[in-house]
Amino acid sequence: MKYKKLELQNTAIKCENEEEFNHLMDIYTEYGWVWNSGEEPHSHKPPMHQELIIQYEDGFTRNLNHTNPITFKELLMMITPEHEFEFGELIEVRDCDLEEWLPRIFMGYIKQSIFPYLVCPFVNEENFKKGENVLVHKYKYARKIQQKPTTLNGKTALIDGVEYLLTVKQ
């Protein structure tokens, strides 16, 4: 799921324009929510002559009487995950000046940083067991790895076919 579904009681969303309304309907479609009439989210066109205030719940409706709606942008900040990677996941990263995507291991995320993705290069399991320090680097861009690694006898064969051993513990 691209967006987190929150438990928000008595909440309504104010859309400033048709684009925000359509994006909200995309989110509700992803959630599997429908209008209070049972119709799919995109079955209604936004009435641009009125304020677009929509309830945040399954079985939603327009709610022009809601006294304190949050903006669509506020909702988007609340439901968008900080990152889409899990600790220890193999991802690809690059910086502004790099054209090549590099495979790395995701270690963390620094919110509101220019270089938010913390990753480490591949290290073998023996060095981890010896307690050696692992270098962590920061990158600006990250994405899911394009070719999934395969597991062979408990080892990870990466995209270049080279096997690396890694045990990541939090």
Image (cartoon, rainbow, N blue to C red):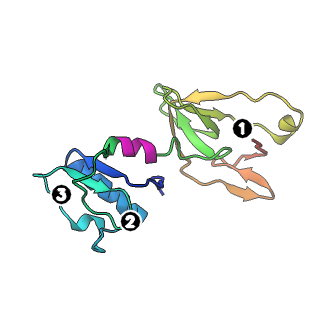
User: In the drawing, does residue 110 fall left or right of residue 21?
Assistant: right
Q: Residue at x 33, y 68 (%)?
A: 34
Q: Residue at x 77, y 43 (%)?
A: 169
Q: What amino acid is found at the position of numbered circle 1 in the picture?
A: Phe
Secondary structure beneath dot 1 equals loop
Q: Earlier in the sequence, mark 1 or mark 2?
A: 2
* Amino acid beneath label 3: Pro
Residue under pointer 3: 46
- Which residue in the rendered view is the most extreme toward the left? 49
Which residues lie in the magenta part?
A: 74-79
* Residue indicated by mark 1: 122
Give the camera-side residue of 162 and 132: 132
Is 75 magenta? The answer is yes
- How crowded is the residue under tag 1: few (<14 C-alpha within 10 Å), some, or many (20+)? some
Residue 161: x, y in percent? 68, 49
Assign a secondary structure to mark 2.
loop
Q: Is residue 160 magenta?
A: no
- Left or right: where does residue 66 sit relative to residue 83? left
Residue at (31, 44) in percent of width and height: 68
**Which residue is painted at 79% across and 45% down in the image?**
167
Q: Which quarter of the rendering shows the C terminus?
A: top right
